[in-house]
Image (cartoon, rainbow, N blue to C red):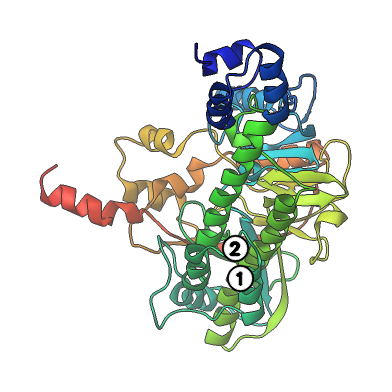
Amino acid sequence: MRITGKDLIEMGFTSGPWFSEALAFANANDLRGDALRSYLDGVAPVVLPTIPLQTGVGYQVNIEATCEAEVENIEAVEATMNALMRTPTLIDGAIMPDACPAGSKGTIPVGGVAVARNAIHPGMHSADICCSVMVTEFADSDPKTVLDAVHKVTHFGPGGRANGQRFTLPPDLFDAFRENPFLRDQKLQAAAITNLGTQGDGNHFAYVGVSKAGGRTCLVTHHGSRGPGAILYKLGMRVAEGYRQTLSPQTLKQNAWIPADTQDGQDYWAALQLIREWTRVNHDVLHQSTLRAIDGKLHHRFWNEHNFVFREGDLYFHAKGATPIHDAFLPDTDGVQIVPLNMGEPVLLIRATRNGRNIGFAPHGAGRNFSRTAHKRSLEGRADAEVFAAETAHIDARFFCGRIDVSELPSAYKSAATVRAQMEAYDLAEVVDEIMPYGSIMAGDWEADAPWRKRRRKDGR
């Protein structure tokens, strides 16, 4: 009688690719009883005990509801954080006043921070790695001139720049990409070239205003690592999933991790730092080009990310839409950080120190109480142009593609005053200056004229 895989499972062995060879050998040699057990014990792979989900790990709640819509939003945020904090690597966390859900239950929310020991979770920085903001303060330029110049310089929408309109990636940075196992991907390297100097879509922007304290014109850009970051995220999630299946199958797929002390972990951490540098350059080329276009003079420039992983010892702080304020997380700033709210509100410049409530972070913006779709539904019966005129009467608001995106107008976001008040009430950060709004450029509803939509309209669908 031949031995089958079912027999091996009944003997307590875990099914796997090794079964095929083991069964062939056992049957060919007619192994039975103790001889079979001895052989299988020698060839079966060692199965390590898996790590179960945990319970009882708390997190700081730095948000409260001031209206009915916020009650439902906070309940959803807390439900997803409660599931997230069961991930066995996590030891602490926090949610900020701008928090809102960002996926299925257990996914780190926007405005969320998760602290892991010896683990990097690609899903907790998400595909928009190093989404960040940069400020250039001009010595002597007027706001309209700067806004007009950056409008000509920047690029919003899908994809990258066409030939003849591209910026040059620093050779040493490109060489470093080639040397990193995660960044050798050809599509990633091509995107690093074509996407340089692009801002994408969604809530990304080029904003011009005037410093309340100094009276100087300021350019603020908001975007992340574009195509290179999105590809790195996918590669990281693929590696993390391999570890999840072995180490902790109970962990949600979006919360898989790469052990930081493995070669994969070290390579991924190095890749994140290179993507961070690419993103800084991505901002910088737009600011420098704007400066040259108007023959302007630079007074000051600084930046910070709010979608990244920050390290302190063996602890990895994953911020999904949270602004770092702790000195150890600020390797190249003077401690002043940038918090935009919406196109019609001031951009806040903040400073803070770490405490038990903020665990080293502040809000990154205003957040949302409703999805984009839900917000658009709430405006049914009103023309986009009417809503746009009412909400942007005091600023020079522009959409790069020429079509209004009502889901990016001020009413799509939480109350800026509420977020700011809660930032103060929970001792998260202090506002040290404000960049008062003059105008803003965003991608706009470019999908309305996407090729597939045009085809559908032409076909009467």
Residue at horizontal 20 percent and vertical 54 percent from the top? 454
Viewer-side residue, 246 vs 427: 246
Residue 73 picture quarter: top right
**Image vertical order of residue 362 relative to residue 187, above or below:** above
Residue at horizontal 55 percent and vertical 74 percent from the top? 286
**Which residue is denoted by mark 2 in the rendering?**
183
Residue 419 picture quarter: top right
Percent across and percent down for residue 355 are 89, 41
The reply to whether dot 1 and dot 2 touch (C-beta < 8 Å) is yes
Percent across and percent down for residue 265 are 73, 50
Alpha carbon of mark 1 to alpha carbon of mark 2: how far? 6 Å
Q: Which of the marked residues, 1 or 2, is nearer the chain's N terminus?
A: 1
**Which residue is denoted by mark 1 in the rendering?**
178
Query: Which three-letter amino acid code belongs to the residue tagged 1?
Result: Arg
Residue at horizontal 32 percent and vertical 35 percent from the top? 380
Query: Which three-letter amino acid code belongs to the residue tagged 2?
Result: Leu
Percent across and percent down for residue 229 are 57, 57
Q: Secondary structure at mark 2?
A: loop
